[in-house]
Image (cartoon, rainbow, N blue to C red):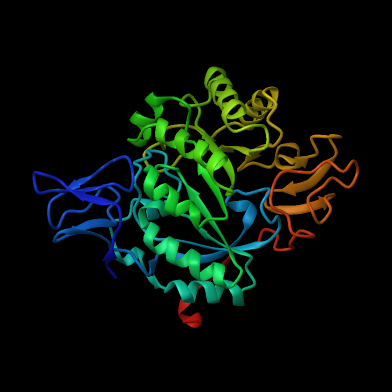
């Protein structure tokens, strides 16, 4: 289903410039943007994947990853196809790089998605698997339908978006996980075909101009973005511009897509990165895609007690009160907490939306 897109401009040479993301794709009639899902039809831009998804699944919220947003609860997750980055290491390349209509097998209106989330007792809905900024009209409509039923919305994104659509998009989001791919312009350009600065602007915007709860993920790739120098610079920037309470996840790379010749990230690299980030006063630094009790758990920054124990996506011990304060010393843990944690655990439940239509 094609619907009119927003944020484009007619140029003097007759082309239309898409202004959703900093790629500024300039299109003749019938052409598609780099993301593949935004296209020119006549004198307007259209979104070609509205109401169409590559699949729905109920996941643990911790898988997004979000460790400080309604912990332990189930989240209905879905994506479409395409992406506005060209990451050579993409871990979801079969979806994000898809050019096949068959990938979009599941059809669902915003109201159907909200109804499904409610019936499945999900506390939130995630726009994930591929980047939701490229299907923002669909994501915004889904978010509005979810909010009418008291369901939260989560964006899992690379944060590569222009200021005007960014303001509209995040106005409808309750939480986000932003992929900070690396901390050098060279890596961004060579490995993703994008630029670092717009992502940093998104992070500052989220912190200082919205009430969106957000966390950051950096996938550490051996020899590419895991040097001490880069980790120090990233940690220092986060501490200075975002403060100590934004959770930071360092996750392990596994060989995939066009980077199959690079070995998986050693656990020691994640631990080293976590130690460096903590040295800058960051309170909530995590390791991911590995078994690491210390790196997966949350600690009170007041008394250092373990307040949320995690094994991958499963919560064990939990020592926060209903408001998110440490039961031992009363220090408030930053995040969004609503009573006791959920009990969804590590389950993954594929869902067909047709039964909720």
**Image vertical order of residue 274 relative to residue 9, above or below:** above
Query: Which residue is at the far left?
Result: 13
What residue sits 37% from the left and 47% below the top? 164
Query: Which residue is at the far right?
Result: 328
Q: Is residue 53 left or right of residue 31?
A: right
> Residue 284: percent from the left, percent from the top?
69, 37
> Residue 191: percent from the left, percent from the top?
37, 33
Between 105 and 49, the one nearer to me in the picture: 49
What residue sits 63% from the left and 56% below the top? 61
Q: Quadrant of residue 228?
A: top right
**Image vertical order of residue 2 relative to residue 35, above or below:** below
**Image vertical order of residue 288 relative to residue 173, above or below:** above
Q: Quadrant of residue 95?
A: bottom left
Q: Is residue 84 left or right of residue 172?
A: left
- Residue 292 in view, yes or no: yes
Q: Is residue 241 left or right of residue 318?
A: left
> Residue 222: percent from the left, percent from the top?
50, 28
Q: Quadrant of residue 24?
A: top left
**Image vertical order of residue 277 relative to residue 229, above or below:** below
């Amino acid at each position: 289903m094609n619907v009119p897109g927003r944020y484009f401009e007619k140029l003097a040479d007759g082309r239309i410039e898409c202004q959703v993301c900093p790629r500024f794709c300039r299109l003749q009639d019938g052409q598609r943007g780099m993301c593949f899902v935004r296209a020119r039809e006549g004198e307007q831009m259209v979104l070609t994947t509205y109401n169409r998804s590559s699949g729905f699944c109920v996941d643990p919220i911790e898988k997004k990853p979000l460790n400080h947003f309604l912990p332990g609860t189930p989240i209905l997750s879905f994506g479409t196809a395409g992406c506005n980055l060209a990451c050579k290491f993409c871990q979801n390349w079969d979806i994000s790089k898809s050019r096949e209509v068959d990938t979009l097998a599941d059809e669902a209106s915003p109201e159907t998605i909200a109804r499904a989330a409610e019936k499945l007792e999900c506390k939130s809905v995630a726009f994930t698997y591929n980047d939701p900024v490229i299907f923002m009209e669909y994501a915004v409509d889904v978010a509005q339908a979810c909010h009418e039923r008291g369901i939260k919305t989560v964006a899992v994104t690379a944060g590569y978006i222009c200021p005007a659509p960014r303001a509209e998009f995040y106005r409808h989001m309750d939480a986000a996980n932003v992929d900070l791919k690396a901390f050098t312009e060279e890596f961004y350009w060579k490995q993703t075909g994008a630029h670092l600065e717009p992502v940093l602007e998104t992070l500052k915007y989220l912190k200082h101009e919205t009430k969106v709860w957000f966390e950051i993920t950096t996938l550490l790739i051996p020899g590419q973005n895991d040097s001490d120098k880069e980790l120090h610079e990233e940690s220092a920037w986060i501490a200075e511009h975002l403060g100590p309470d934004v959770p930071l996840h360092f996750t392990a790379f596994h060989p995939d897509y066009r980077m199959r010749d690079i070995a998986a990230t050693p656990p020691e690299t994640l631990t080293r990165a976590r130690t460096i980030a903590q040295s800058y006063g960051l309170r909530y630094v995590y390791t991911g895609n590995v078994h690491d009790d210390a790196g997966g758990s949350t600690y009170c920054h007041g008394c250092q007690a373990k307040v949320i124990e995690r094994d991958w996506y499963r919560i064990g011990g939990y020592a926060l009160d209903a408001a998110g304060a440490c039961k031992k010393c009363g220090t408030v843990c930053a995040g969004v907490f609503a009573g006791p944690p959920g009990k969804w655990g590590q389950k993954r439940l594929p869902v067909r939306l047709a039964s909720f239509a």
